[in-house]
Amino acid sequence: MVALSPRGCRRGGRELARVVEDDERDGGRPVRPSPIVGRSSEVAALTARARSALSGRSQAVVLRGPAGIGKTRLIEGLLPGLALEHRATVLRADCREVTSGVGYGAVRALFAPLGITGEDDPRLTASARWALPVLTENVAADDLSDSPSYRVLHGLYWLVVNLAAEAPLVLVLDNAHWCDERSLHWLDFLLRRADDLPLLVVLAHRGAGSAGLGALLTHSRCTSTDLGPLSPEEIADLAGNMLGARPTPAFLRACVEVSGGNPLLTARLFTELRRDGAFPDDAAVARAREVGRDVLASSVLLRLAGLPEQARAVALAVAVLGGAVPEGGADVVSMLAGVQTRMVGVCTEALRRNEVLRPGELDFVHDEVRAAVLAATPAKQVDRLRMRAARLLNDAGRPAEEVANQLMLLEGLPEPWMLGVLTDAAAQAEQRGAPDAAASYLTRALKHLEPAAQIPVRAQLARCLAHTDPVGALDQLGRVLSLSTDVRQRAEVAVHYGLTALAMQKAPEATAMLSDVLAELGEAIGPEPTAADADLRTRLWAALLFVGSDEKTTMPVLRELARTMPLPQGETPAEREVLAMASSLAAVECKPVEHVVDLARRALRGPTGALPTWAVLNAAFTLQMADKTDESLAAFGSVLEDSREHANLWSYCMTLASRALLHHSVGDLAEFNADIHTAHAVFVQEPWENAGMVPWVGLAVSHLERAELDEAEAALAHVRTDRIDDLIWEGPHYLMAAAKLHWRRGDLDGALDHLFRCGAILEDSGITNPLYARWWIDVAYIRAEQGRQSQAGEIVERAQDLAQQWGTLRGVGLGLLAEGVLAEPRRAVRVLSEAVEVLSATPARLDHAHALCKLGQASLCADEAKGAREHLRGALDLATRCGSQVLANEAGRLLVFAGGRLRKEIRSPIDGLTGSERRVAVMAAEGNSNREIAESLFVTVRTVEVHLTNVYRKLGLSRRAELPGALALTPASEKGTA
């Protein structure tokens, strides 16, 4: 039944018979050299790195070289002793070709010996629980969410932290060239956070690396070692060990030629010569050359040829299964090989005695042995066996991913059930947080589907690609829209298309498509739709509002929509999404403040967890604009809590950056700095280079408030500016920060250029609320500094009219501030006095401080030195309490000029803390452990420790217990005056 012939071998029956005598000659044990021959420099380097890593300075080592070069031998010969020396836990997995497409397949194999089966396992405490979908075969359907990928990475990281807390940890991946990309991505994630964990990661691969392997090699903690061939002297030593005597020069030259110095081939050559009773002298040169031709394949096939047919069938079955034989695998091997179950054990023992299978495992001694078995079998026969293996695994109820591994290696998929297995495997992979693996299954399935049947598969593929390949996702969604004639299906897909296009800065195209589909759906469902149809239309409407509000060219579409579609009541989550977007759009268009606040409150009625992050953030923004600070903070807080609970890092980061702007608007720069620095710290550790600019702009503003101009410039340099003038939300904030930088450097014309660009974006977009982007106030300041007050008068007057229309005290006060800056001194004092009075009744403490400073300056110009000193003292104190170093310095300078004296500066030590240090210190003072702080902030424990060390040093503390008193008793930073 099974043809495994020793091609290229010229042995007679008597020589073949020697194979079955192996048990007698070698006692049933594989013949291999016990010591590691050569490799002294590699052994020394690996030993040093391992000892450093297991002592608490994490390291990764990549061993590279062709098959048989000795990577596995080096690992097996060295690591057990080092692990024993450090009492380390060693987790090892051999990657397989047949499982190379399984998302987190290598990770699951690594952690399988731990026997983790449920959340009640003590090693899955807190955030480590998110690792469970990867560690078990079956994943519950409710584990699937919009983006489980980060949660799984996060959970696996904390599982490693838990394990490393018990004992130093060694993770070994052999044959890493077949490691799935998702497992490699996790190792990259882990190494970026490993800090001072007692962790050693070792990977062995054949040199041709994937993108994931390439990323690992860029880590500062990672070193690679290339294993080369054995030297002639080392081969001579090996010959002496295995053949019992030093070889003659001629024999050694022949062995070097035929083996190329490859340790595996050399050892196989010497094993065969030893079986023949050869002596390493000149008389054996010809025999060495003969045996050396394709020595590995010929030696394996010769041994198989000398075994019964049943043993050969078992070997081929194990080869087809890829070494990844499931639990109870003897039954599967039995059915695939056509051999009785009781005989499988007999056959495997014979294969082990002949160095084909590993002791105690249904796996080959080396992957090259498996490759030799498959290469000697006709391709059509292998294909038939793979199909049979897939059917057997499927009938046995094995996970779809395991069955799909066999199907992925077939040229065709001739049976309909195979497509169902691939889509089921994709769903499992997606639920595990391995969208790239899911995409590979779906891509294969698409090749065998008719166009009409491709629609749900392409939609699922787009969802999988959305976070890793948004361009590909958009292409798949576009194909679905072109294939589908069902308007309801098109509407569902259109929502996903719009949100994906937004991430690609393709809002205009997406807005046009969403508008067309919304019109199609409206015609189809009529004036009295069912509840399901009405909800679908509302979700499509909400997506259109969100996507269309991103760029200035799409705003007219939204205004037309507002005229034709009445706002809903907010009874469903979809209706609340519409209200959230309607509130923010009405706010920036300067609709009455009472109206927009009502919309935002209705949007937030009910649990915010039922709404997407973007909807809650838009409602929170509206409340912020209306100076409903507490309500806005509560909305931001609800999203942050939900983000932590579900380990949604993107939502967490963007919400922190958005809340930071609220803290800045009320003059709480300490909280602003804490939020923006925390968001930035998370942002830069992820591969989100072009995914957003808010954290970078916020960081620049933080530096500008501290007069750190070079740092602000460096932060702004990270922002992509090629389409900045098209973006409604991000463009104005970037341009205002860039203008402030030019202004502080003395480039007033450059500052004005950026400010007028900001104004142009807003005008083109129809955004009229002067509080959204206060560029007009900075224009007034700069024109006054230039002595060209008249050139800003019209701009300020228009802003004042709109501020009155908006109706908040802050808007009125800021209008008076800008008017006063442009007025002549006597009138300026009157106008600015009114501005101070109005702003003092608002949450805008920093704006109040600015008004006091400008009032002091105007009083000085009006020869009212006493009044000037009083106002400037107030400005100085308030600016210092807010944390604005720039404004405090300006008020202090003017105060001295007005004849006042600065008292000795009394600065709180807290002023010296960075935003991240302050956030960590407060959380520690509240009783949170370092672990709890790290999990809450999505950073490492080591990062928390570093921050606390800096806090203790800056505050002069010696222990944690002193933190609450230091933070409570040290007042917010103040500067006194006399």
Image (tube, rainbow, N blue to C red):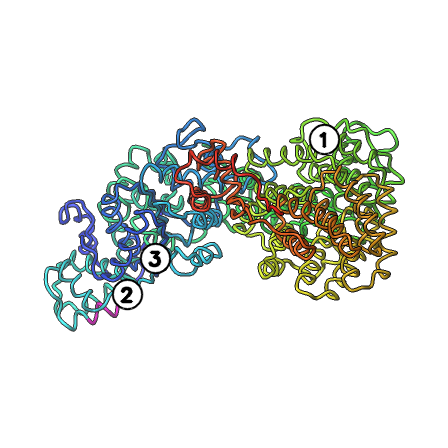
Kind of residue sitting beneath label 2: Pro
- Distance between mark 1 and mark 2 Cα atoms: 68 Å
Q: Main secondary structure of the magenta part?
A: helix
Instruction: Please provide percent x and percent y for residue 345.
Output: 28, 36
Residue beneath the point at 67% across and 34% down:
635
Residue beneath the point at 18% across and 52% down:
34
Instruction: Please provide percent x and percent y for residue 675.
Output: 59, 43
* Mark 1 touches mark 2? (CB < 8 Å): no
| Horizontal side, residue 381 vs residue 642: left or right | left
Q: Nearer the viewer, residue 65 or 872?
A: 872
Residue 433 visible in the picture: no
- Distance between mark 3 and mark 1 Cα atoms: 55 Å
* Mark 3 touches mark 2? (CB < 8 Å): no
Q: In front of the other: label 1 or label 2?
A: 1
Q: Which residue is mark 3?
A: 63
Kind of residue sitting beneath label 1: Leu
What kind of element bears circle 2? Answer: loop
Instruction: Please provide percent x and percent y for residue 354.
Output: 23, 48
Mark 3 or mark 2: name the one nearer the start of the chain: 3
In the image, the segment drawn in magenta is: 253-260
From what the image shows, is residue 419 above or below residue 889? above
Q: Which residue is mark 2?
A: 229
Kind of residue sitting beneath label 3: Leu
Q: Which residue is mark 1?
A: 604
